[in-house]
Image (tube, rainbow, N blue to C red):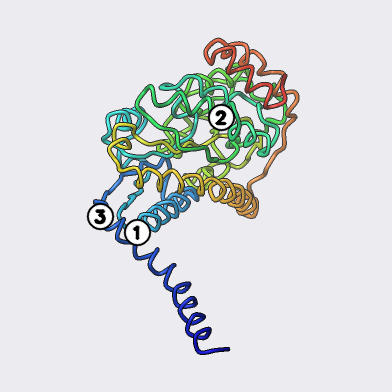
Amino acid sequence: MSEISRRSFVATAISALAAPLALGTFASRAWAATPNYTLKLAFADTTNHPVYGVLRRFADNVRAKTNGAVDVQVFSIGQLGSGANIMTGLQTGIIDLCAHTSGFIDTTFPQFQVVDLPFLFPDARTAEKVLDGTAGSKLLDLMPQKGIYGLGFGHWGWRVVSTVDRKVPRPGDMHGMKVRVQPGAIFASTFRALGASPTAIDLTEVYLALSQGVVDAVETPMISVAATKQDEVVKIINQTNHVYNAGVLMASKSRFDTLPANVQGAIRAASREMTADWRNTVAVKSTEAQQAMQKKGLEVVQIDRNQYLSATSSVYQQFRPVVGAALFDAVMKEAGHA
């Protein structure tokens, strides 16, 4: 190699090595010009719930993507209010972000009740196909008109019915039971259709309600049975899997719109990347929770899904006009019911 060629080669190599460094420096400078932001994220459950860890990783990812410019602080259940207060906080910009179940937002967006129809989804793959598809996009597109952005769907875990001492393999076994349900019209209607007596009780009060005999049973995700210490009172977990229990990551529109475009983009990218982590974590932890409770002596009972689906058909008829025929029928088709 001639001296000129050698010098040319060295210069090219140095340029190739320097380019990424220069790009990184440029990116750092770009974020350095971005003001620092602290965003409050309201989480619907306790700190020992697996989704709390998912959200902490989301916060870390946002921090990394923004070179430290954005600090997402995750607050567990009750710290930033509860129930309707959180939705109001999102709409007014007092709360910046929120992760909650689809059932929680039904009062603000009645159309979301369609994904909480009893026994709608036979498995997680079908549920995720619907939520990640056209029907899911239509649901998220409804949110900005009421001051909220839907950033994506996650999963809270299939809902089950835990009881003090009663097995409910068939719909008739539910008759006369006092069941704690998640606040929301569709949950109450589902259990009334089964002949039970539903009572809406906040998650923070479930343990006390069971202990004092206010209710005979509780319907929550499998993970929550352990997270809220229900397993200290109940003896039987009826694996009804009656609702997929979609999670939704939401942002306050009024707050989000004030953020620079690069910050908005980083948050949206991090939320997309979080989806797989969210779903995988819940799937793994649900199985682990079930196995741990079985080792403690709790019995897991399987149910006749087809009988339950037939017994709750009236709920579908009741909520079709509430959701809107077009959206309802689209979800039914994508879920394999059409």
Q: Give x and y (percent) for residue 125.
A: 68, 39
Of residues 154 and 49, the one drawn nearer to the viewer in this rendering: 154
Residue 136 circle label: 2
Q: Give x and y (percent) for residue 122.
A: 70, 32
Please tell me whether mark 1 or mark 2 is closer to you in this view. 1
| Residue in view at x 44 percent, y 33 percent | 150
| Residue in view at x 72 percent, y 19 percent | 338
The amino acid on which the numbered mark 3 sits, given as a three-letter code, is: Ala
Q: On the picture, is 219 further left or further right than 62?
A: right
Of residues 310 and 113, the one drawn nearer to the viewer in this rendering: 113
The residue at which mark 1 appears reads as: 67
Spatial separation of the CA atoms under disc 1 and disc 2 = 32 Å
Quarter of the image for residue 190 reads: top right
Q: Pointers 3 and 2 in contact (CB under 8 A)?
A: no
Of residues 218 and 82, the one drawn nearer to the viewer in this rendering: 82
Please tell me whether mark 3 or mark 1 is closer to you in this view. 3
| Residue in view at x 59 percent, y 14 percent | 326
Quarter of the image for residue 118 reads: top right
Q: Give x and y (percent) for residue 132.
A: 59, 35
Residue 209 circle label: none
Please tell me whether mark 3 or mark 2 is closer to you in this view. 3
The residue at which mark 3 appears reads as: 33
